[in-house]
Image: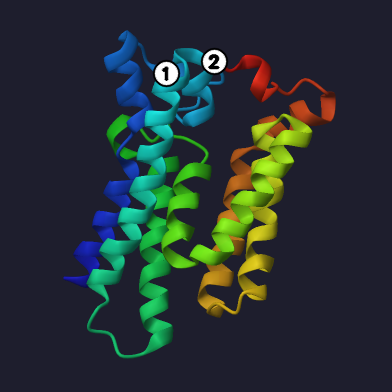
Amino acid sequence: MVHFMLALCYFIGAFPPGYIVAKLWKGIDIREHGSGNIGFTNVLRVLGKKAGIITLICDVGKGVLAVYVATYAASGVESPTIFALYRAIGGALAIIGHNWPVFIGFRGGKGVATSLGVFLGLAPIATLIATGIWIFLLLISNMVSLSSIITAALLPLIIFATHYSIVYIVIGILMAVMIIIRHKSNIARIIRGEENKFFKKAR
């Protein structure tokens, strides 16, 4: 039962709101437009604010949902460490599902919004602090990618500072590595000074 519920976390993450919204909104494959990403930022730029916000809410929501599914699956576990591990695995599987979704040929997003949802479920105080940092970085850099990369790298330290389980710190490190790798093309554009600005592009 536990293994089934954890597998379900992957499929929750693999559900592609951005792809579906684009199909319903304009009848397009969002991966063939803009940056080619199925996440909030690209949907916002290609389809506008409403579609972007719907995508963001759904992507964050599926991360939260996956953690709660994993929490339910591990409800009979007595060891706090194993309990935390099950929750972390469920969250990680949701992020993997978002990045490599089986439903659309394993071409997914970069995992930022879904990671936000996962860590809201795992470590809410640390995540709210990290969200504040992300907003501050976005305001001064005007780049979603740079803000996301820096915040992802800082999150494990914030989790450590707020005294959460070592399991969540480790999964935070793995999430940060995954987000940085998924943003390698953005990093190259940032270095060249060619990265898209957020506020100028949003409509």
Residue 73 image position (x, y, % from top left): 23, 71
Query: Mark 1 belongs to which amino acid?
Result: Ile
Residue 88 image position (x, y, % from top left): 43, 67
**In the picture shown, does residue 124 fall above or below 152?**
below
Query: Residue at coordinates 55% horizontally, 77% vertically from top-left?
Result: 164
Which residue occupies the foreground of this view, 62 or 185?
62
Picture disc at residue 30:
1
| Few, some or many residues within 10 Å of mark 1 (<14, 14–19, 20+) | many
Residue 123 image position (x, y, % from top left): 50, 67
Corner quadrant of residue 194: top right
Query: Decide: marks 2, 1 in contact (CB < 8 A)?
Result: yes
Query: Mark 2 belongs to which amino acid?
Result: Gly
Q: Mark 2 sits on what residue?
A: 34
Q: Is residue 136 left or right of residue 56?
A: right
| Few, some or many residues within 10 Å of mark 2 (<14, 14–19, 20+) | some
Furthest residue toward right: 192
Query: Residue at coordinates 49% horizontally, 51% vertically from top-left?
Result: 115
